[in-house]
């Protein structure tokens, strides 16, 4: 309770403050609509928000899974072969810092306009880097005592990876996945701003804004927030299930 | 058969660099079959290093190490010894029982037998009730006891222990000393035991090997023949004489 109550109180206060600023300050709706106006739109458009969220959610999920699997495999390879790891870390750090989302228009031109693949590829690439870097760090961080112990058992490389490296890397892996889960939703939504199939939250936001229906645009933004939050919380739940020893 | 022969071993870390350390110089040590040998000496004199050399976790700079009449590397591969490090080195993602099971698991022993053996060992170190806990839920001394149980689980011919009782209270320590002696006597295990406690070394050992620092050398090897290793043994004049002898050897 003590962990849940303060953020909720803070959130409610922020909303009230927002509402008061907009109504008392007579802020034009194209600058910032009131939370109540956004809420009304959200209720009115709930069917559309839901459908768009499902489409964006599916893209984010596919991208997240594909990107994570690729990243974990790459991290395993990079931890196994020393030189590969040394080369790949700075490389991954630099590429990961680039605005990968900018690839969206190029990918959109490579596929048909009815394809969901470009958005999923962008998402997968965005997801790849935090998962790769964190997992690799975890795989490399083996305590010297564990190393000596497994050596004393004459354990081979594969046994060592399976029994020590992988479970030891789980906390780092999930740090990466937590970052990646939010990024996946952002990437899947924002990729639609650059064309391609227009069935997700990103497309709805741009078209609502183009029609100057600002509260509606904000309703879809709220949908995107909720989707991102869902991804984050599910990842958090998986983390708890995967690492019961951390709960204790 | 001889359990351990360390022949004229020198160990230099970071050879040729500015941080070069001669951890051990010209060390000779023989541990007979079934013998209990303690290593005692000031901090940094190379006790852990000597244990690691016997375990073939590091290689000597010069000299040879033989375990069970084989080169140390071969003995390690053939799982001739069990080891308990100065740090417990438990795997935090395994429960206490599964930690003790690990060496059995790696030897391909079946699930049921593994479980039974692990529970028996946990009983021995007084942690039967904590089998399902994770190491993070245990105190330092309890973790140390799990590590001891893990080293004993495979019933190795040679036991290498690095200050295993360092983090324990006096009562637990004395109880585990007796348990360890009983196990060693029953299975004729040879033991190399590192400790900072003179009384512990004298009580447990057939021989106490005293080391000095910088560079690490063996300065004395003191035979101990206690009339019995129990409460009466701890009261015997021999016990006190030997404690004095080891203390004098440590002072140099
Ligand atoms: N891996 C290493 N690299 C470099 N120097 C080392 C290494 N391991 C040990 N040494 C050095 O070797 C010397 C002996 O270390 P060792 O750990 O064997 O001491 P010890 O007798 O076990 O001490 P303590 O009683 O404090 O555990 C120390 O000076 C230490 O700095
Ligand atoms: Mg030591």
Image (cartoon, coloured by chain):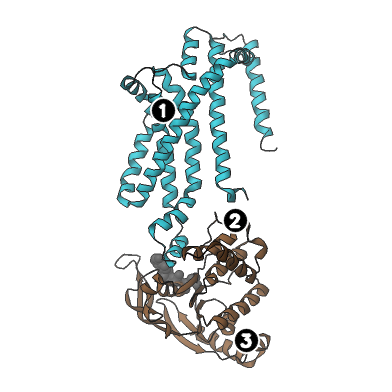
Chain colours: A cyan, B brown
Location of residue B214 with respect to B225 vertically, above or below = above
Q: Residue at x 55, y 42 (%)?
A: A239
Q: Residue at x 41, y 66 (%)?
A: A154
Q: Residue furthest right?
A: A1
Q: Which residue is more in the foreground, A242 or A38?
A: A242
| B241 left or right of A120 in image | right
Instruction: Find residue B125 and report its horizontal and vertical position in percent.
Output: 63, 70
Task: Name the element at disc 1.
Answer: helix
Determine which residue is flagged by label 1.
A120
Q: Quadrant of the N terminus of chain A?
A: top right
Q: Residue at x 56, y 30 (%)?
A: A230
> Toward which corner of the image does residue B112 lie, by quadrant?
bottom right
Instruction: Find residue B19 and report its horizontal and vertical position in percent.
Output: 35, 65
Mark 2 vs mark 1: in front: 1
Please report, as a chain letter, where disc 1 is located: A
Gap in Å between the C-alphas at discs 2 and 1? 40 Å
Can residue A99 be seen here? no
* Circles 3 and 2 on the same chain: yes
Query: Callout 3 environment at 10 Å: few (<14), some (14 to 19), or many (20+)?
Result: some
Mark 3 vs mark 1: in front: 1
Confirm if mark 3 falls within 8 A of ligand 1: no
Can residue A123 be seen here? yes
Q: Are marks 3 and 1 in contact (CB under 8 Å)?
A: no
Determine which residue is flagged by label 2.
B136
Gap in Å between the C-alphas at discs 3 and 1? 72 Å
Please report, as a chain letter, where disc 3 is located: B
| B67 left or right of B133 in image | left
Count of residue discs: 3
Query: Callout 1 environment at 10 Å: few (<14), some (14 to 19), or many (20+)?
Result: many
Query: Callout 2 environment at 10 Å: few (<14), some (14 to 19), or many (20+)?
Result: some
Task: Name the element at disc 3.
Answer: loop
């Amino acid at each position: 309770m003590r962990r849940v109550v303060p953020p909720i109180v803070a959130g409610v206060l922020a909303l009230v403050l927002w509402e008061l600023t907009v109504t008392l300050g007579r802020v034009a709706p194209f600058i910032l609509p009131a939370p109540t106006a956004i809420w009304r739109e959200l209720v009115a458009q709930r069917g559309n928000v839901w459908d768009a969220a499902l489409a964006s959610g599916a893209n984010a999920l596919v991208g997240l899974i594909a990107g994570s699997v690729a990243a974990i495999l790459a991290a395993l390879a990079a931890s196994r072969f020393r030189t590969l790891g040394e080369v790949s870390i700075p490389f991954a750090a630099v590429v990961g810092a680039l605005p990968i989302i900018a690839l969206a228009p190029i990918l959109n031109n490579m596929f048909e306009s009815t394809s969901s693949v470009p958005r999923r590829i962008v998402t997968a690439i965005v997801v790849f880097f935090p998962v790769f870097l964190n997992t690799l760090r975890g795989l490399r961080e083996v305590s010297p005592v564990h190393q000596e112990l497994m050596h004393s058992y004459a354990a081979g490389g594969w046994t060592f990876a399976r029994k020590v490296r992988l479970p030891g890397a789980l906390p780092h892996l999930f740090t990466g996945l937590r970052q990646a889960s939010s990024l996946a939703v952002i990437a899947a939504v924002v990729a639609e701003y650059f064309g391609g199939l227009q069935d997700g939250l990103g497309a709805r936001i741009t078209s609502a804004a183009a029609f100057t229906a600002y509260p509606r645009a904000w309703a879809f933004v709220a949908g995107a927030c909720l989707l991102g939050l869902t991804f984050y919380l599910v990842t958090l739940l998986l983390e708890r299930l995967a690492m019961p020893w951390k709960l204790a | 058969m001889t359990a351990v022969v360390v022949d004229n071993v020198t160990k230099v870390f970071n050879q040729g660099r500015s941080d070069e350390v001669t951890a051990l110089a010209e060390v000779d040590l023989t541990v007979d079959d079934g013998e209990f040998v303690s290593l005692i000496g000031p901090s940094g004199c190379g006790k852990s290093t000597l244990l690691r050399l016997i375990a073939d976790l590091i290689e000597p700079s010069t000299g040879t190490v033989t375990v069970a009449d084989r080169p140390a590397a071969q003995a390690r591969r053939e799982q001739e010894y069990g080891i308990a490090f100065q740090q417990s080195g438990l795997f935090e993602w395994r429960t206490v029982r599964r930690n003790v099971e690990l060496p059995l698991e790696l030897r391909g022993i079946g699930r049921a037998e593994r479980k039974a053996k692990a529970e028996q060992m946990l009983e021995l170190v007084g942690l039967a009730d904590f089998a399902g806990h994770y190491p993070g839920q245990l105190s330092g001394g309890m973790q140390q006891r799990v590590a001891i149980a893990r080293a004993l689980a495979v019933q190795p011919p040679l036991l290498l222990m690095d200050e295993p009782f360092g983090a324990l209270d006096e009562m637990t320590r004395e109880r585990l000393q007796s348990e360890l002696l009983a196990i060693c006597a029953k299975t004729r295990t040879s033991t190399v035991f590192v400790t900072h406690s003179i009384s512990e070394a004298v009580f447990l050992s057939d021989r106490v090997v005293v080391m000095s620092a910088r560079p690490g050398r063996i300065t004395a090897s003191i035979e101990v023949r206690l009339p019995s290793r129990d409460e009466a043994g701890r009261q015997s004049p021999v016990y006190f004489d030997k404690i004095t002898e080891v203390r004098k050897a440590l002072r140099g």
